[in-house]
Amino acid sequence: MIRRINETMRILLVGHGKMGRMIESLAGDYECDVAGVIDPQSPAHGGNADDERWHDVDVAVDFTSPEAVMSNAPVLAKRGINLVIGTTGWSAHERELRTIAGQAGIGVVAAPNFSTGVVLFEAIAAYAAQLFAPQQQFGAFLHEAHHAAKKDAPSGTALSLKRTMEQAGFRRTIDVSSTRAGFIPGIHTIGFDGPAETVMLAHSARDRSAFAHGALTAARWIPGRRGWFTMRDVLGLE
C-alpha cells in the first residue's frame, strides 16, 4: 500500500557522508524517521545490510560508492526494502540489480541527480536538442564541474544529459568535458555553437540540499510501487 503523506516512514541511510547527514537533518520535514545507518566508516554505523535491526525499514537511501551499492543493494532488495539510489558509477551492473529488484518485487528510484531543477533542466535540454538537430551548422558541447573529491568524470548527470540530447534527435558529436576543483557542488552547461552565435543553458547547484530534498521526495513516493523508476517518474514527467 502507498503510504499517505502524513504517515511516518522509516528510512535507512546507506552512507553517512555529507549527503547522508544532510538527508538525516531534513528527514523530519518529510515525516521520515531514520531507522539507522549503514556505513562502517561512520560512528553511527548500526550494522550491515543483513542486520535484523532493519526488519521494519520502508526505504533505504543510498549515497555511497559503486562498490558499496553492489554490496548492499542486492541484500536490501531481497529483504523487501525499497531503494532510492543516488550513487553513480555502477551502471555496468544495472541490469543485474534490475533483475534482483524485479524478483524481490520492490520499487527502486535510481537517478544520477535528485535535484528537481536538474530533472527539469534535462527536459529543457531534450527540447533544445530537438530544435537544434536539423540545424547542421550548429555543434553541441556539454561541460560539468564538481568538487575535487568527486571520483567519476564525466558525472552521471552529464552522461544522462548527453543520452537525453541524443535520444531527442541530436545525432552529431556532443563534446563532453569535466572540471574537478575546490568545493563546487555541481554545474552543468550545455551549448550549441554556430558560425556566428552560441546558445548556452546551465544549471548550478548552490549546495547539496537540493539533492537531499529530491531523495526524500523519492523516498516518500516509492513505497507501494514496484519497478524501476527515475526522478522523471517521481515528478510526473513520464
Image (cartoon, grey):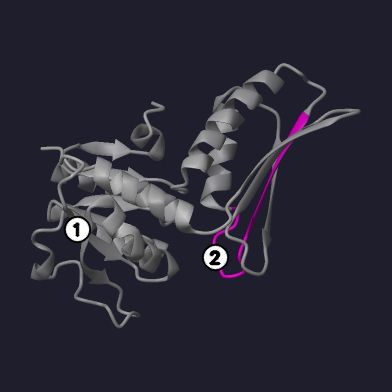
Judge the density around disc 2: few (<14), some (14-19), many (≥20) Cα neighbours within 10 Å: few
Quadrant where the image shows the N terminus: top left
Q: Amino acid at mark 1?
A: Leu
Q: Which residue is mark 2?
A: 151
Q: In front: 35, or 175? A: 35
Image: magenta residue range: 139-154
Q: Which residue is mark 1?
A: 76
Q: What residue is shown at x 63% (from left), y 51% (from top)? A: 187
Residue 149 is a magenta residue: yes
Q: From the top left corner, tell me how far across and down residue 139 is, in percent.
A: 77, 31
Q: CA distance from mark 1 to mark 2?
A: 25 Å
Judge the density around disc 1: few (<14), some (14-19), many (≥20) Cα neighbours within 10 Å: many
**Quadrant hosting residue 17:** bottom left
CB within 8 Å, label 1 to label 2: no
Q: From the top left corner, tell me how far across and down residue 195 is, in percent.
A: 90, 28
- Kind of element beneath mark 1: helix
